[in-house]
Amino acid sequence: MPKLLLILIAILVVLSDQISKSLVVTLDLPYSLNTGAAFGLFGGNIPFLVIISASLLTFLFVRFRFQDYLSISGVGLILGGGLSNLFDRVHSGFVIDFINPRILPAFNLADTAIVVGVLLLFAQLVFPKKVG
């Protein structure tokens, strides 16, 4: 049951991210094309990013030991965000970033899911008995 919940969360993240990116492009809202990883690192090196992303996501899904709903949710968010951005890199060669708060680099819903997922896992590690 934990992996089913994790997969459901990941699917919801992928769908939300892909729909939001499609709407941004369709409605001609401002966006940028990111050919790199976070903050544009390794820009234009799509094969490297695809191999690293796919490897990390596979490792996370196969090797992660689920402890509670907090960690399941965190991994689901990370997998969904990572898979959605990986799909974009393989399909288009770039990721669409459309949330631009000006004080941070532009990002998208997949990036947000990854950050929230990491924060949930961090909280679970720091407060294992109190959280989740």
Image (spheres, grey):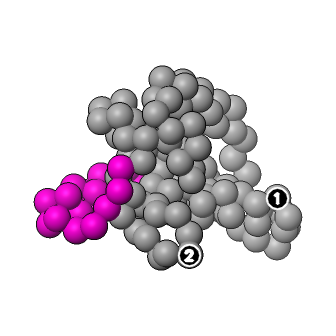
Tell me the crowding category of disc 1: few under 14, some 14 to 19, or many 20 or more residues within 10 angstroms, Cα based. few
Task: Look at the numbered disc 2 and give the secondary structure of its residue.
Answer: loop
Residue drawn at (68%, 64%) of the image: 119
Does label 1 or label 2 sit earlier along the sequence?
Answer: 2
Which amino acid type corresponds to the residue marked 1 in the rendered image? Leu
Residue 52 location in percent, x, y? 59, 29
Kindly report the distance in space between the C-alpha atoms of the residues bearing marks 1 and 2: 29 Å
Which dot marks residue 103?
2
Query: Where in the figure is residue 3, as x and y percent of width and height?
Result: 54, 43
Q: Residue furthest left?
A: 26
Magenta span? 11-33
Element carrying mark 1: helix
Please name the residue shown 35% across and 56% down the image.
Answer: 32
Whether residue 25 is in magenta: the answer is yes
- Whether residue 41 is situated above or below residue 71 in the rendered picture: above
35 displayed left or right of 40:
left
Name the kind of residue labelled 2 in the image: Ile
Label for residue 125?
1
x and y percentages locating residue 127 in the rendered image:
84, 68
Q: Nearer the viewer, mark 1 or mark 2?
A: 2
Q: From the viewer's perspective, tell me whether residue 93 is left or right of residue 127.
A: left
Q: Nearer the viewer, residue 88 or 71?
A: 88
- Image quadrant where one finds the C terminus: bottom right
Residue drawn 20% across the image and 58% down it: 25
Do the numbered discs 1 and 2 sit on residues whose CB atoms are within 8 Å? no
The vertical placement of 81 against 24, above or below, is above
Is there any visible trace of residue 104 in the rendered image? yes
For the residue pair 23 and 32, the one nearer the viewer reads as: 32
Residue at the spot x=46%, y=61% of the render? 107
